[in-house]
Image: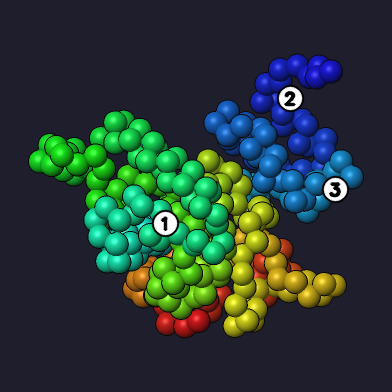
Amino acid sequence: MYNKGHKDVDGLIKIFKDRGMLIGDVEKAKRTLSHINYYKIKEFAEPFFRNETYTNISFEDVIARFYLDKRLRVHLLHSIEDIELSFKTKFAYVLGKRYGAFGYLDFKNWCNKKEFCRHYINDKEREMKKYIKRLINRDGNMIIKKFFLENQDCEYPPIWMLIEILSFGEVLKFYELMSNKNKEEIADYYNAQPNELESWLKALKYIRNLSAHNTNVIDSKILTKASIKNEWKNFLYIHPKNNKPTDRIAVPIIIIIYMLKRINPNYKIWKLKEVFKNLFKDSDYTANKYGFASKNLSIFERKFEI
């Protein structure tokens, strides 16, 4: 049974000290603990906690990690948003070009009939139509509202309008249902195979959700396995025991860099350089912990090509 009682900031400071954490400025640490939850700080100190003791870490170091993670999450959300917008636009373009404004409503037009049976496709079509109706009723998108005011005979919006109210995850689910021909046209734009693109987007969706919910991303494992191109392996840590690529933050970073080079070559990816420079602390060993092959920061340079 849980029986821990309330502790004030002095009590929390004592816990950290008793467990070996160095605290340079106690008063400043108290102020920090009054605004950042103890368990959030503990989360960022976890990699340095072994055998009930903190080793080689100070309270100030932990807070620095917290703010580096916060900066990184802001960059991740911004860059993944650009990728999401591009992917959704390509998805709508392919369906609109091949099947017209409302062809998406007939799933047998564009779904993979070799992989999915007729009943499954029909079920997904019914689910989507119900979902779109709910979205239309609750969404405040002015373009959609204007469309229905001007086209009162229409039950659903055209695909190029619908895409504006569908989430990244929803469009990704529809991409999974697509025929190989449709998938390939979208994936070709990103110089990827359909299975590669799908795995990358799932990894980005996963890290985007962590970032949006104030979760520690620098220490997170990427639970959705992403396909790794051979040329990426020069920049990623490869486990010597099993020869498998890392599952750490380096993976979504390299995906973002690769995709943004095709979407927006002028994207300021170099802004991430300072975050990782501070995380690596000029150490290959530390860089490996985050999934990078070394402390080399060349992938964040403006002129880097991959």
Residue 187 lies, with reference to residue 45, above or below; the image says below
* Residue 265: quadrant of the picture: bottom left
One can see residue 99 in this view = yes
Q: Secondary structure at mark 3?
A: strand
Camera-nearest residue between 42 and 239 = 239
- The residue positioned 53% from the left and 79% from the top of the image is 298
- The residue positioned 30% from the left and 56% from the top of the image is 103
Q: Secondary structure at mark 2?
A: helix
Residue under numbered circle 3: 50
Residue under numbered circle 1: 108
Residue type, label 3: Arg
Residue under numbered circle 2: 11
Q: Residue furthest right?
A: 51
Camera-nearest residue between 240 and 14 = 240
Separation of marks 2 and 1 at Cα, in angstroms: 63 Å
| Crowding near the residue tagged with mark 3, few <14, some 14–19, many ≥20 C-alpha atoms within 10 Å | few
Camera-nearest residue between 129 and 306 = 129
Residue type, label 1: Lys
Q: Is residue 284 left or right of residue 301?
A: right
Marked residue nearer the N-terminal end (1 or 3):
3
Q: Residue furthest left?
A: 150
Marked residue nearer the N-terminal end (2 or 1):
2
Residue 8 lies, with reference to residue 137, above or below; the image says above
Q: Position of residue 202 (x, y in %)?
A: 55, 57
Q: Is residue 106 left or right of residue 37?
A: left
Separation of marks 2 and 3 at Cα, in angstroms: 21 Å
Separation of marks 1 and 3 at Cα, in angstroms: 56 Å
Residue type, label 2: Gly
